[in-house]
Amino acid sequence: DTAVSQTPKYLVTQMGNDKSIKCEQNLGHDTMYWYKQDSKKFLKIMFSYNNKELIINETVPNRFSPKSPDKAHLNLHINSLELGDSAVYFCASSQGRGMPLHFGNGTRLTVT
Amino acid sequence: AQSVTQLGSHVSVSEGALVLLRCNYSSSVPPYLFWYVQYPNQGLQLLLKYTSAATLVKGINGFEAEFKKSETSFHLTKPSAHMSDAAEYFCAVSYYGGSQGNLIFGKGTKLSVKP
């Protein structure tokens, strides 16, 4: 019954590796997002997808790439991981841009 | 450009005392405003939202917030704090239909509740 679920919950990996985080929502929402929360709890939007179309792409390195196979899924793929990528990554969904977000429980990424 | 400022990164109150968490926004058009709560090791949960209806908004867990356009504020209050209210609280702003439309979050306020 989880509305927004993301896996894995914890991800520990070495610098230079490539990893993916999966996200699924069962709310029927049209828009999905990825947010990054740093060690100071600051939340910054990375991407959003509306009907499988990327509509926001903030100043995020191109090592990060969102992939949406369908409206209910938005996965995050990260190439060549760096120490500074260590953070908690949250997936979220909403009925539309500017509407309340429903968050997953986060993926804590640690790059060593 | 939209922005939101939360005054006080850490607020500490005694159990039973008034909770007041401050949020000021900057928006060139009428905003939508939100308060979210984050418990340890969890995602963010919506507490309440203002979308241009009533200026006093009631949310879950006894929280409420008042939209004051003249002060560009949307402070969060609760009359009596409970130990379970200890968490991180985030104010967020957006406006529907804008070219961006995504929620912009404040830096958060950590609420501690002393017994």
Image: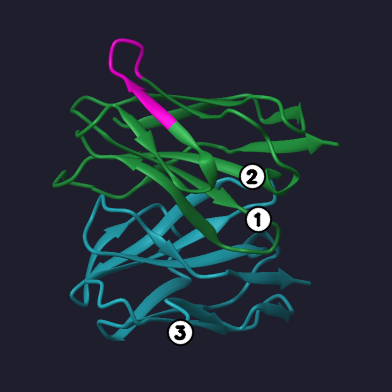
Chain colours: A cyan, B green
Indicate the secondary structure of the residue bearing disc 3. Answer: loop
Image coords of residue A96 (percent x, y) = 21, 60
Please tell me which residue is depicted at 52% across the width and 49% down the height of the picture.
A43
Please tell me which residue is depicted at 13% across the width and 47% down the height of the picture.
B97
Label 3 belongs to which residue?
Answer: A1
Separation of residues labelled 1 and 2 (CA atoms):
6 Å
Extent of the magenta region: B65-72
Say if the magenta span includes residue B32.
no
User: Label 3 lies in what chain?
Assistant: A
User: Height in image: B62 above or below A31?
Assistant: above
User: Height in image: A84 above or below A15?
Assistant: above
Name the kind of residue labelled 3 in the image.
Answer: Asp
In-image side of A94 versus B66 (left or right): left
Label 2 belongs to which residue?
Answer: B88
N-terminal of the pair, mark 1 or mark 2, is: 1
The residue at the far left in this view is B97
Please tell me which residue is depicted at 69% across the width and 63% down the height of the picture.
B41
Name the kind of residue labelled 1 in the image.
Answer: Tyr
